[in-house]
Amino acid sequence: MGSTGILVALIGVTIVLGAVLLTRPAITAGTTGKILAFVGLCVLPALCIEAGMSTHMQRSEQTQFCVSCHSMTTHGQSLYVDDPTYLAAQHFQNHRVSPDMACYACHTDYTIYGPFKDKLQGVKRIYIQYLSTPPAVIHISGGYSNLQCLHCHAGARNFEENAVHHAMMDSLKNNQMSCISSGCHDTVHNASAVGQLKMWRPGQ
Amino acid sequence: MRFGALGVQAFIRIASVLIILGAVLELVSLRWVHPLAFVLFAFGAVSLIGLGILIYLASLVFTASTDSQSLGRNAKAGT
């Protein structure tokens, strides 16, 4: 039984105990009933919230979760562009990041994964997606931080020994020169052009 | 209506209903991997379950205060 199975079982027990207390609240007059009420109406529900939040946070790290938003569809398709200059596609297709967590791997500080302020941003984006009009081109607020690249690439031999990287290492680490917008690795998703590009089909 | 007029059992019933509804919503939210499932859980299930827990805890406070008032009355009456 996986963690989701355990959570479902926990929720099931909570519902059963809740139903018992709903139909026979008089049992809480006795000591055993009081303990049962405390477990059924406080301990188990609190565990359901905690385990549910953990499960949903883990699920939200999946590529499938991110690209299920309509406005992220083309970003998801861009992972299959058959062009080695497309940064996100190359990372995804060559398993430089886990394909199941491709978005999260490069956007670990994005919306709900970051601190509370970022979580509020995530809720705002959900609001825009379902109750407002998403912008035609989506930008990351505050820009893309090099730290997202460096948490994997820093210390890697082929990155550190590259003469160009070596010459500008301080600027890269201080985020003064962006990895993706300085004429170096500037083709990332290019989501608006996805419809006109040749796509890689796995297994063909 | 006084807070205590509802009685402890009514509080228990209301808390049970809210927790059952919240738990059912949580079960539904686990059925698919989608941002709306997260919203359903975070705003629906957590709110209902959280409110249910709070109402249950309020019933405990109500019980404790009722018990202490009864003890006080009994002490005055010398029973």
Image (cartoon, grey):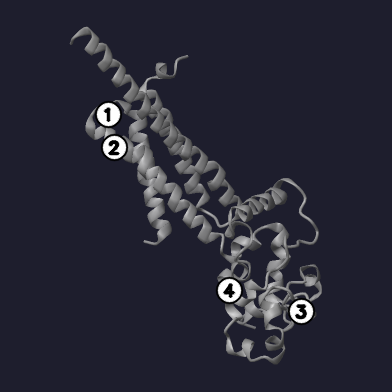
Q: Chain of mark 4?
A: A
Residue that mark 1 sits on: A27
The quadrant of the picture occupied by the C terminus of chain A is: bottom right
Residue that mark 2 sits on: A36
N-terminal label among 4 and 2? 2
Q: Say what amino acid the circle numbered 3 marks.
A: Lys
Residue at image point 56% right, 59% down: A60
N-terminal label among 1 and 2? 1
Residue at image point 60% right, 64% down: A64
Q: Disc 2 versus disc 3: distance between alpha carbons?
A: 62 Å
Residue A57 makes an appearance in the image: yes
Instruction: Tell me, yes or no, whether dots 4 and 2 are on the same chain.
Output: yes
Residue that mark 3 sits on: A198
Q: Chain of mark 2?
A: A
- Residue closest to the eye, A62 or A184: A184
Residue A158 location (% of width, % of height): 62, 90
Vertically, is A141 above or below A105? above
